[in-house]
Image (tube, helix red, strand yellow):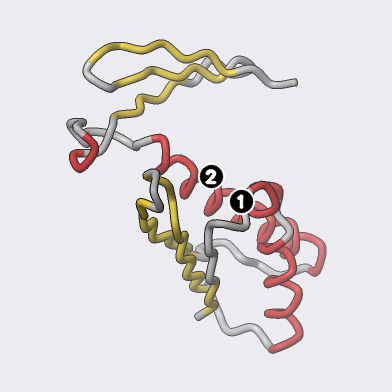
């Protein structure tokens, strides 16, 4: 088990420490939810975790098939909804590969990103459309 320790700093801000490495990050509530918006919000970290996980799995697929995927760029657009409670409604993923890949490779890469652990852990209430460019 990996443990993270979080401390509430006040003003809707927290500091998180990654147990194994000691790395830290700050979260801040977004402006539209009474925060300052000066750092990642908790829901921004969900979107970031999804993108990072997908890129990791693209890297794993690249390693397995001998493809150089360095420079691949991924963006995640986060859309909030209130139904009736505030939550993430959509995470729109756009993946721009570093070069052209054939249809078979894109099929392998699509399977990689849709089976990464973060994607598999996201509620079915959250839409996650994925496009490759």
- In this rendered view, identify the residue nearer to me: 109 or 76: 76
Query: Quick check: 127 left or right of 27?
Result: right
Seen at 66% across and 61% down, the residue is 58
Query: Horizontally, is 12 left or right of 75 in the view?
Result: left
Q: Position of residue 83 (x, y in %)?
A: 40, 53
Q: Are marks 2 and 1 in contact (CB under 8 Å)?
A: no
In the displayed structure, would residue 6 be above or below residue 114? above
> Residue 68: where, in percent of width, then height?
65, 67
Mark 1, Cα crowd under 10 Å, few <14 / some 14-19 / many 20+, is: few
Per the rendering, the mark at residue 49 is 2
Q: Find residue 94 and report its horizontal and vertical position in percent.
A: 47, 70
Give the side of residue 49 with respect to residue 115, left or right: left
In the image, what residue occupies the spot 40% across and 25% down?
A: 25
Residue lying at the far bottom of the rendered structure? 103
Mark 1 sits on what residue? 123
Q: Nearer the viewer, residue 88 or 24?
A: 88
Pick the quarter of the image with the N terminus. top right
| Numbered badge on residue 86 | none
Residue 54 x/y as whole percent? 61, 56
Please tell me in which quadrant of the rendered image residue 44 appears.
top left
Splitting the image into 4 quarters, where does residue 4 fall?
top right
Quadrant of the image occupied by residue 92: bottom left
Tell me the distance, in whole angstroms, between the alpha carbons under discs 2 and 1: 14 Å
Q: Secondary structure at mark 1?
A: loop
Q: Residues within 10 Å of mark 2 (few under 14, many from 20)?
A: some
Most distant residue in the front direction: 84
Q: Which is more foreground, mark 2 or mark 1?
A: 1
Mark before the other along the chain sequence, 2 or 1 = 2
Answer above or below: position of 17 versus 48. Answer: above
Assign a secondary structure to mark 2. helix
Vertical relation: 25 (above or below) 9: below
Of 129 and 52, nearer the camera is 129
């Amino acid at each position: 088990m990996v443990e993270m320790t979080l401390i509430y700093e006040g003003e809707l801000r927290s500091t998180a420490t990654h147990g194994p490495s000691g790395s830290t990050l700050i979260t801040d509530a977004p402006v539209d939810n009474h925060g300052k918006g000066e750092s990642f919000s908790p829901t921004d970290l969900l979107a970031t975790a999804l993108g990072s996980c997908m890129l990791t799995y693209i890297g794993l697929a690249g390693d397995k098939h001998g493809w150089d995927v360095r420079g691949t760029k991924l963006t995640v657009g986060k859309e909030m909804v209130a139904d009736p409670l505030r939550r993430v409604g959509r995470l729109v993923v756009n993946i721009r590969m570093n070069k052209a890949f054939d249809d078979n490779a894109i099929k392998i890469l699509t399977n990689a990103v849709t089976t990464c652990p973060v994607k598999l852990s996201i509620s079915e209430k959250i839409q996650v459309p994925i496009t490759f460019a």
